[in-house]
Amino acid sequence: MGSPKLQGRHLLGLDGISKEDIVMILDTAKSFREVLDRPIKKVPPLQGKTIVNLFFESSTRTRISFELAERRLSADVVNFAASGSSVSKGETLKDTARNIEAMKIDMVVIRHSSPGSAHFLSRVVDANVINAGDGEHEHPTQALLDMYTLREKYGTLEGLRVCIVGDITHSRVARSNIFGLRTMGAEVSVCGPATLIPHDIEALGAKVYHRIEDIIPRVDALNVLRIQLERQQSGLFPSLREYHRYFGVTIDRISKAPKPITILHPGPINRDVEISADVADSEHSVILEQVTNGVAIRMAVLYLLGSTN
Ligand code: CP
């Protein structure tokens, strides 16, 4: 029997991914999560493979997490940052990628501000492509690590009630979570001001709420999103203080839930804007578990795609 294989050669998003592929990634991540608790955290499956991390947009968690995952799997790793590269001299994404591929690499992890950039890259290079966040479109490994964290806590995603709170319009994390959670049989809702919720979001299967007090009694978990000031037009809400007043996830609000509620956040967090500092640091929060699980999820994705070559 050969190694397990995903249906495609790339991980570009969770839109259209099968339940079998998600389960395979989550189950494989569980084995790698155990490796992370060992004194020696390195295993050999990607020995001899070369992976390039192409980050055209800033990142702390995803960039470090991918690099750690690659090194834990014994791959050779090259990091690229747009600043200081020939992108500043006008080189296109296609030319940058094809020149890097000419140096004989096997896999590319890309973060880029343009939606569709990972799909584009997968058409112009032979290497496996993994989307580490493309503009407002998708961030599949973030949603997979969110789902992994919830599955570990509740044992299943089937029937789990998850609400994504905040800036849904500008959020690739929200889109990937909606696709993934719905495929796994979870009940997904979104909550935020009308100006931050796309008018067609219900077509993706997410129920819409505009008052956080209405959603808290109905869910098992809140996935709280950062207010993305860098992607917003002005005037979508009056002020950060007002946003916190109406939508901030506070201890006072979550203590009204009939049973303990789990708080996720993809990071980076804006303390006392979308989430109060005491909630971020409380026993409800699984934010740092998400970060640890992210390494295991990325190891699983790299391993499963690496074994398709
Ligand atoms: N969650 C996430 O994508 O964080 P970074 O932007 O720091 O990678």
Image (tube, grey):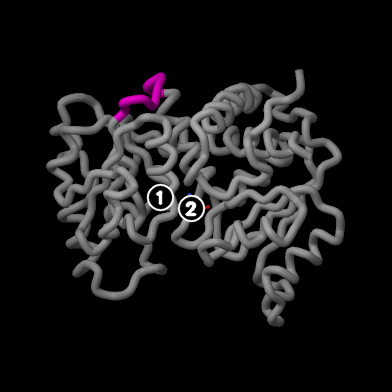
- Mark 2: few, some, or many residues within 10 Å (few <14, many ≥20)? many
Residue displayed at 47% across by 46% down = 15
Percent x, y of residue 36:
63, 28
Across and down, in percent, residue 8 comes to 64, 41
Q: SS at mark 1?
A: helix
Task: Reply above or below: 150 against 237.
Answer: above
Picture quadrant where residue 303 is located: top right
Q: CA distance from mark 2 to mark 1?
A: 6 Å
Q: Position of residue 164 (x, y in %)?
A: 31, 45
Question: For the N terminus, which image quadrant?
Answer: top right
**Kind of residue at disc 2:** Glu
Rendered location of residue 39, percent (x, y): 69, 23
Please give the residue where the numbered disc 2 appears in the rendered image: 138
Residue 136, quarter of the rendered image: bottom left
Q: Residue at x 55, y 57 (%)?
A: 59
Q: Nearer the viewer, residue 107 or 72?
A: 107
Could you tell whether 27 is left or right of 85 in the image? left
Marks 2 and 1, the one that precedes in the sequence:
2
Q: Which residue is drawn at the image coordinates 41% and 39% (left, top)?
A: 287
- Main secondary structure along the magenta-highlighted residues: loop
Question: Which residue corresponds to mark 1?
Answer: 175
Residue nearest the viewer, comparing 203 with 274: 203
Q: For this view, does 284 lie left or right of residue 287?
A: left
The one nearer the camera, 2 or 142, is 2
Instruction: Write down the region rendered in magenta.
Output: 153-160
